[in-house]
Amino acid sequence: MGGLFGIVSQTDCVADLYYGTDYHSHLGTKRGGMAVRNTHGFHRAIHNIENSYFRTKFESELRRFHGLQGIGVISDTDPQPLIIGSHLGTFGIVTVGRINNMDDLVQTAFSGKKYFSGTSDGVTNPTEVAAMLICQEDSFEAGIRRAQEAIQGSCSMLLLTDKGIYAARDRLGRTPLAVGRRPGATAVSSETSAFPNLDFETSCFLGPGEVLFLTADGWEQRIAPGPRMQICSFLWVYYGYPASEYEGINVEQVRYDCGRALARHDDTPVDLVAGIPDSGIGHALGYANEKKIPYNRPFVKYTPTWPRSFMPQDQAMRDLVAKMKLIPVRRLIEGRRLMLCDDSIVRGTQLKDNVRMLFDYGAREVHVRLACPALIHPCIFLNFSTSRSTLDLLGRKTIHTLEGAEDKDLPLYAQAGSAKQCALVEEIRRLLGLTSLRYQRLEDLVAAIGLPKEQLCTHCWDCSSSF
């Protein structure tokens, strides 16, 4: 997915930029980057973070950074930030999202005799495409508006200029941006969890398509928000950090309420409840407290040296890293009926391995409850599961097996309680070797978030969101 952080300050901003960007490391898998502007111009650095942490790659370079304003990004796609020279002046740009009509935009640019330099293996850098669209207008505001209208998909961005930072949320608000203030400094962040330890107070959340201009003294609105919002529901279920808020709604509270909802519809007798680290923990605490069943940790996560399990590009290595991080606790497993809560099932490989491990260590039963419905549509907005084919999603692959046709009766499989949906859940339960399996009902997930369904993107579950 990726995350953004920007700051404008009356004093040197580099330390805040460094730590604020680092607080987004859970959102991206490939690259981290920072850029600052000072009296000498722009200074930028980009590093690969697939096999190491953001802090370790940038710490040794901090002495070469200085300035009163800067932008940072954790990216799961292209190298960023870019420094663009244009008739609008020189500016830095970072983006998150997904441009689905890249080929059309690139071909239109070529027909106008434009070119792109930021290519990798012949693929044009999406951030450079966004910058190209911006530079076709006579002001940053008009250029951002043009880009948002032209891009199909999602693209939130920060622009670092000589006078301050433009913060622009994507047209339908699928990715969040929040503004924080402290005396003498203004910051903008994808995650509000980046603010507290840097002494920022969350001041506002940008609306869909809204553009603000940030200075050290505050901000002013340059483009008003649009009337429609469809923020990604999966931010609360999985992507977001527990301390963060989107639209004023805390991630950990939503996960707790998701667990409570799962418990209210369940009467399975178990001995203990556990969350699959990390995002499953909040869901499990809600389940355990609602049912008044002990919460325990039959496996613990070893984090000192193992990087994130989705970092390696090779799937076999991702599966190995995921397995190595979870260490079983036999005394809490042997002879027990276990209830595991997790955010979702994507491919199912890691969960299947975990279930096998628990039975090998003597579990009597292993039940799983998931905080969202079955994923049956790949995300086309935020680069979640987009590197996989449709049939790499366990839910969709199972439907294909049951139907003999990939796209038959998908609405019925998305309908909670339908015969098709029950058959899907039962087949996945069998494939994973579980004692029982249940998914969250979509209406309960929506209720836990607390926004109207029409303001949420639920595409990966029911394909009902706008384009």
Image (spheres, grey):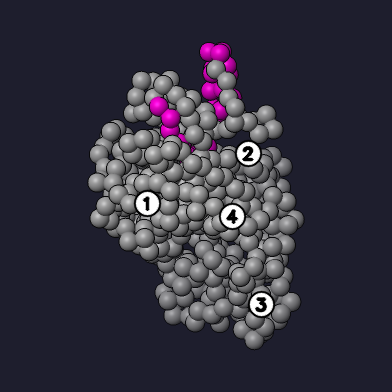
Observer-nearest of 7 and 344: 7
Q: Which residues are magenta?
A: 89-113
Residue at the (59%, 64%) spot, across then down: 437
Residue corresponding to mark 1: 12
Q: Left or right: where does residue 201 sit relative to residue 30?
A: left
User: Which label's residue is closer to the chain start, 3 or 1?
Assistant: 1
In the rendered structure, which amino acid carries the disc numbered 2? Answer: Asp
Queried whether the magenta region covers residue 110, the answer comes back as yes
In the rendered structure, which amino acid carries the disc numbered 3? Answer: Pro
Q: Left or right: where does residue 227 sit relative to residue 28?
A: left
Observer-nearest of 149 and 91: 91
Q: Work out which residue is located at the far front of the displayed protein and give it.
A: 40
Q: Are marks 3 and 4 in contact (CB under 8 Å)?
A: no
Residue at the (53%, 13%) spot, across then down: 112
- Looking at the rendered image, the disc whose residue lies closer to the viewer, 3 or 2, is 3
User: Which label's residue is closer to the chain start, 4 or 2?
Assistant: 4
Observer-nearest of 234 and 110: 110
Looking at the image, can residue 419 be seen?
no
Considering the numbered disc 2 on the image, is that residue within a helix, a strand or a loop? loop
Distance from disc 3 to disc 1, alpha carbons, whole Å, reads 46 Å
Residue corresponding to mark 3: 328
User: Which label's residue is closer to the chain start, 3 or 2?
Assistant: 3
Looking at the image, can residue 44 be seen?
yes
- Looking at the rendered image, the disc whose residue lies closer to the viewer, 4 or 1, is 1
In the rendered structure, which amino acid carries the disc numbered 4? Answer: Lys
Considering the numbered disc 4 on the image, is that residue within a helix, a strand or a loop? helix
Residue corresponding to mark 4: 57
Residue corresponding to mark 2: 407
